[in-house]
Image (cartoon, helix red, strand yellow):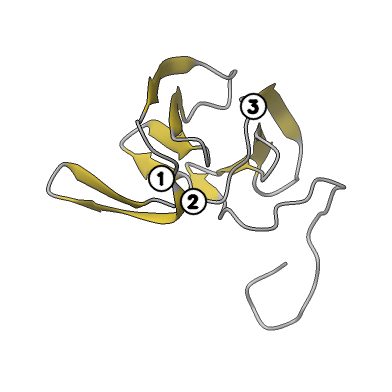
Amino acid sequence: MKADGSGKTLWSNGNRVYIPSMLVQNGYLYVVNDAGMAYCYVMKTGELRWEHKIGGKFTAFPVLVGEHIFATSDRGVTTVFKASPKSFELVSENTLDYNVVHARVLWQSCIYACSK
């Protein structure tokens, strides 16, 4: 939607994101949906640049740190990938010893997460 109060829809698609937030960097929209699919769109046009199945269920919001996106599944697997419109580029995967739900907080190079 256009952020000018007009209510005008600029573009749309059939992908659904119910819980996690979306991220914007350098004119591109990055999405990790509830079902574990990651997408990159051109922000102005909605053109899909890439999609990649990360796997898992997601309720925690993805976090952008520099040029990396951290997406943590409910099972505690954090997938780190580059915020790049060229292609999905996996940086690392890390597994926690506990489940993670909802939001995380970053503070002074630490990540605080809520667990079940």
Q: Position of residue 55 (x, y in %)?
A: 64, 27
Mark 2 vs mark 3, CA separation in Å = 15 Å
Q: Residue at x 12, y 48 (%)?
A: 108
Quadrant showing the N terminus:
bottom right
The residue pinned by badge 1 equals 63
**Marks 2 and 3, the one that precedes in the sequence:** 3
The residue pinned by badge 2 equals 61
Q: Position of residue 36 (x, y in %)?
A: 65, 34
Q: How many C-alpha atoms fall within 10 Å of the one at disc 3: few (<14), some, or many (≥20)?
A: some
Along the viewing direction, whichever of 84 and 17 lies nearer the viewer: 17
Residue with the most extreme right position:
14
The residue pinned by badge 3 equals 55
What amino acid type is highlighted by mark number 3? Answer: Gly
Mark 2 vs mark 1, CA separation in Å = 6 Å
What amino acid type is highlighted by mark number 2? Answer: Phe
Identify the secondary structure beneath mark 2. Answer: loop
Q: Residue at x 41, y 35 (%)?
A: 70
| Closer to viewer: mark 2 or mark 3 | 3
Drawn side of residue 89 relative to residue 50, left or right? left
Drawn side of residue 9 relative to residue 57, left or right? right
Q: Are marks 2 and 1 in contact (CB under 8 Å)?
A: yes
